[in-house]
Image (spheres, grey):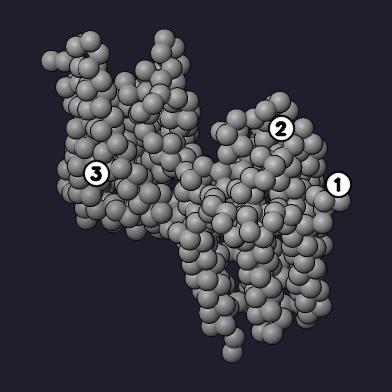
């Protein structure tokens, strides 16, 4: 059993859970209904970091052909850029 | 099967074998057509949401206050954990399929937990009179989380069939492909929620 | 006429459906559809200004909607050998295709009724158009079943040279799953999920158009391939 649990994927899971908790901590400890650029931008970046972990390790893209990696990587990069840009456009 | 070069998540492969391991598409290539299609559509959802949010930030910020961040975080942790269960199950299925079923069942349990949480979350909202018609923010909230829930329910069906496949004595290559493809779908469901949760519940 | 020629007629019927029924929709000027949140007066004015155009477009749509049917039959003819001697999937495909065709056939009559007497009570005009648009845009149940039956047949195809490549089956499944968005317009009159919204009109219509072109090409290939193998069998 130990050989199954001591694995990269377990580490990825723990790291993702930690990252999620950090996002939540950043998210709840804010003034409600008030813009907060640093917290929100950090949350967006943490989100894409988690996506990178899950897609790379759980969806096994790390071992996938380049064409698939490029497609998924492009999707992530474009989405992250769009979301950050649209979010920042709102800031005064 | 023991030293299969196809298992890229197995940390115990000798380094020499790992470096010459064939590139492997999890599941049948066709599954990725489905997954990429969903990724593009949901990506458009997120972008459109942020665009409209920009047109009326105060409404969105004010409406967001009614969302229950605690249920949201529990759901996120549930889906992440269920994804980990699925990954472990698929890794096991490649080596010794008889032990894989339990992990798929655990993932299924987490998925059911997500659905139950969602039910209570929607119920609480509806009790306070917040519906799809209340305003634009809640329209997006109900539609996006509803469509995601639809994918979770589909995923539960897929997990159930995956569990069924792990009961087979020696699954053929097509069954293994279904296990991998089904797992990828479940991970996509997880990934979409990873974005959806902060987008709706946490972003100020 | 032999069976291959008949099946090819079905494929061309599908092409003709796109051109003629699609052309009819274009003629009405309702690409994209009118917004659902217009006041009754505005709807009436719109119809009054375009009544001839609408009626012309409707004439095309009602006349040529039926061309969807020989195309549907060809699809079933292609998948029938997969489950022979059974016919469940082929018949499910054909009959759901028939029901799907209804959503191409009936809504134009409601547009026609609105344009036929454009000076009537605006609320009546709006009601007629509401029925027409809701039926046309949200009537996706039959399509979902049609494409699901096709997908099941494609996945069940264990022959050496399958009718359609497996990835087409996955595409069918994705389209079926994503079509569920088409039910949302029942609840909204504006925004990207209303009947003229981005995610209910533009995205599905684009996907449907590209997919239709693709499936016609693959169907034609499948029909020609079947005729070659039948010819080969008749020789041996």
Q: So how many labels did they put on this image? A: 3
Label 3 environment density (alpha carbons within 10 Å; few <14, some 14–19, many ≥20)? some
| Cα–Cα gap, marks 2 and 1 | 18 Å
Mark 2 chain: B
- From what the image shows, is residue A10 above or below residue B50? above
Label 1 environment density (alpha carbons within 10 Å; few <14, some 14–19, many ≥20)? few
| Cα–Cα gap, marks 3 and 2 | 48 Å
| Pointer 3 with pointer 2, Cβ within 8 A | no
The residue carrying mark 1 is A1
Residue at 46% across / 55% down in the picture? C199
Report the side of C77 relative to C174 (left or right). Answer: left
Q: Secondary structure at mark 1?
A: loop
Among the 4 quarters of the image, the one containing residue C67: top left
User: In the rendering, at what x and y percent does residue C39 appear?
Assistant: 41, 57
Q: Are marks 2 and 1 on the same chain?
A: no
Q: Secondary structure at mark 3?
A: helix
Residue at 57% across / 48% down in the picture? B26
Residue at 72% across / 77% down in the picture? A33
The residue carrying mark 3 is C22
Disc ID at residue B31: none
């Amino acid at each position: 059993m130990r050989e199954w649990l001591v694995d990269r994927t377990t580490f990825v899971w723990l790291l993702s859970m930690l990252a999620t908790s950090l996002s939540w901590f950043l998210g709840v400890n804010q003034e409600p209904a008030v813009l907060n650029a640093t917290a929100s931008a950090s949350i967006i970046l943490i989100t894409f970091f988690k996506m990178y972990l899950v897609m790379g390790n759980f969806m096994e893209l790390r071992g996938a052909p380049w064409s698939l990696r490029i497609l998924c990587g492009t999707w992530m990069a474009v989405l992250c850029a769009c979301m950050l840009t649209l979010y920042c456009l709102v800031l005064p | 099967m023991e030293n299969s070069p196809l298992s890229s998540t197995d940390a115990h492969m000798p380094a020499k074998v790992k470096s010459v391991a064939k590139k492997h598409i999890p599941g049948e290539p066709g599954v990725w057509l489905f997954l990429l299609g969903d990724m593009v559509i949901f990506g458009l959802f997120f972008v459109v949401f942020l665009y409209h949010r920009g047109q009326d930030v105060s409404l969105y910020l004010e409406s967001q206050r009614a969302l229950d961040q605690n249920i949201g975080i529990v759901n996120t942790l549930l889906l992440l954990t269920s994804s980990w269960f699925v990954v472990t199950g698929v890794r096991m299925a490649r080596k010794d399929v008889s032990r894989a079923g339990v992990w798929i069942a655990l993932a299924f349990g987490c998925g059911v937990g997500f659905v139950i949480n969602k039910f209570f979350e929607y119920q609480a909202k509806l009790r306070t009179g917040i519906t799809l018609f209340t305003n634009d923010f809640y329209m997006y909230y109900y539609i996006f989380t509803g469509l995601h829930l639809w994918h979770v329910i589909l995923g539960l069906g897929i997990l159930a069939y995956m569990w069924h496949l792990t009961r087979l004595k020696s699954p053929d290559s097509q069954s293994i492909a279904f296990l991998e493809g089904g797992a990828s779908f479940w991970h996509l469901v997880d990934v979409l929620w990873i974005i959806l949760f902060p987008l709706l519940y946490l972003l100020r | 006429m032999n069976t291959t020629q008949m099946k090819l007629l079905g494929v061309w019927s599908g092409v003709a459906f796109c051109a003629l029924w699609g052309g009819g929709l274009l003629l009405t000027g309702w690409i994209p559809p009118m917004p659902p949140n217009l006041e009754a007066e505005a709807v009436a004015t719109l119809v009054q200004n375009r009544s001839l155009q609408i009626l012309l477009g409707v004439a095309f749509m009602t006349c040529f909607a039926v061309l969807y049917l020989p195309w549907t039959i060809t699809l079933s003819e292609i998948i029938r050998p997969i489950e022979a001697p059974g016919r469940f999937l082929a018949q499910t495909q054909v009959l759901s295709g028939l029901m799907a065709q209804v959503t191409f056939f009936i809504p134009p009559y409601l547009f026609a009724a609105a344009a036929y007497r454009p000076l009537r009570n605006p609320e009546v005009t709006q009601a007629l158009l509401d029925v027409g648009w809701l039926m046309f845009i949200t009537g996706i149940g039959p399509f979902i079943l049609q494409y699901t039956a096709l997908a099941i047949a494609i996945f069940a195809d264990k022959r050496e040279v399958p009718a359609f490549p497996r990835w087409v089956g996955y595409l069918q499944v994705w389209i079926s799953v994503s079509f569920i968005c088409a039910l949302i317009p029942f609840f909204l009159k504006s925004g990207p999920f209303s009947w003229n919204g981005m995610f209910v009109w533009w995205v599905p219509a684009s996907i449907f158009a590209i997919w239709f072109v693709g499936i016609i090409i693959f169907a034609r290939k499948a029909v020609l391939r079947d005729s070659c193998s039948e010819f080969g069998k008749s020789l041996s």
